[in-house]
Image (spheres, rainbow, N blue to C red):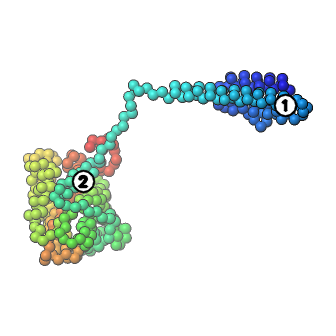
Amino acid sequence: MEEKLQLLGKEAIAALAEAEDVKELENLRVKYLGKKGELTELLRSMGSLPKEERPRMGQVANQVREQVESAMNEARKRIGRLEMEARIAEETIDITMPGKTFVQGTKHPLTQALDELKAVFIGMGFSVVEGPEVDTVVNNFDMLNAPKNHPSREMSDTFYINEKVILRTQTSPVQVRTMMNTKPPIRVISPGRCFRNDTPDATHSPMFNQLEGLVVDKGSTLGDLKGSLEIFARHLFGEHTQIKFRPHYFPFTEPSAEVDVTCFKCGGEGCSMCKGSGWIELLGAGMVHPNVLRNCGIDPEIYSGWAFGMGIDRIAMQKYGIDDIRLLYENDLRFLSQF
């Protein structure tokens, strides 16, 4: 019995000394020290020995078991060191290698144009207000003095959700909401997305971005409007930029005007961008129609107001020399990375 224990212990220690990985080490543990391991089975058979031999065999068995367990621990440490050295060698970082290049993004040209517009008007004392992109027909048309027979109210021109709800065709409903919930004086700009049933081409898109401004106060005049727009145009396009008003019609303003600015490419001398005229159409403006003020609960006998509206897309296209509005919405990095 003692000889078997000694031989089995030497065999186990020799096998553990040659183990190369954790899996092999675990197999040897099960083989010798597991519940059905060879050393465990041998120890269980000690019950059949004579009583006088059991103390001696028990002492030898404990010594052999301790030797095997000690060899097991040493093998575990040795294999752990080898695996760590292998990982260190495999995961070594060459600090002389160039690092990864991370491309820094830029703001979309529409965002850049909007940020610049907001900076100009905030500097002139305007506040920024926003409203829902889905609004009522009443806010979008009726409150703005656009009667039921107005062309823009046709299904072919406007996206209708139902008879009473539409995708807003302009940000003017935000001005309506502001006048109905704020007492004059009012000085706000309302940027945001708008929607019209247009076929996409180089100059039209069913979705576009607009910025409108509104001032309502006692004694507001057309001269205040023109002076404010001159400051805006010179800040955006250069100190020598001039503007001119051309008579126009909008149902929500009276009088109304289209506002042109001197071509910032040729300085007003005439070029391909301005089609030789020296002027570029930029926005629409006018004095707020008394009916609009009255609809919003403001007395036109006490207060007067002026408003303007411009397409942010058009501003960006003119400022950055973009000739197709579709480029602003195609998310092509080759195009966007230029800005």
Which of the pair 140/9 is nearer the observer? 9
163 is higher (above) or lower (below) than 171: below
Q: Amino acid at mark 2?
A: Leu
Q: Name the spot of residue 233 as percent of width and height, x first.
A: 14, 54
Q: Name the spot of residue 97 as percent of width and height, x first.
A: 40, 26
Quadrant of the frame with the N terminus: top right
Q: Name the spot of residue 153 as percent of width and height, x first.
A: 28, 69
Sequence-earlier tag: 1 or 2: 1
Judged by depth in the image, the label closer to the viewer, 1 or 2, is 1
Which of the pair 171/184 is nearer the observer? 184
Task: Determine the residue positioned at 84% across, 25% down.
Answer: 2
Q: Say the numbered circle drawn on residue 114.
A: 2
* 287 sits to left or right of 14: left
Question: Can see residue 91?
Answer: yes
* 5 sits to left or right of 302: right
Which of the pair 1/334 is nearer the observer? 1
63 is higher (above) or lower (below) than 233: above
Question: Which of the 4 quarters of the picture holds residue 128?
Answer: bottom left
For numbered disc 2, what is the local secondary structure?
A: helix
Q: Return the residue at label 1.
A: 55
Question: Which of the 4 quarters of the picture holds residue 100?
Answer: top left
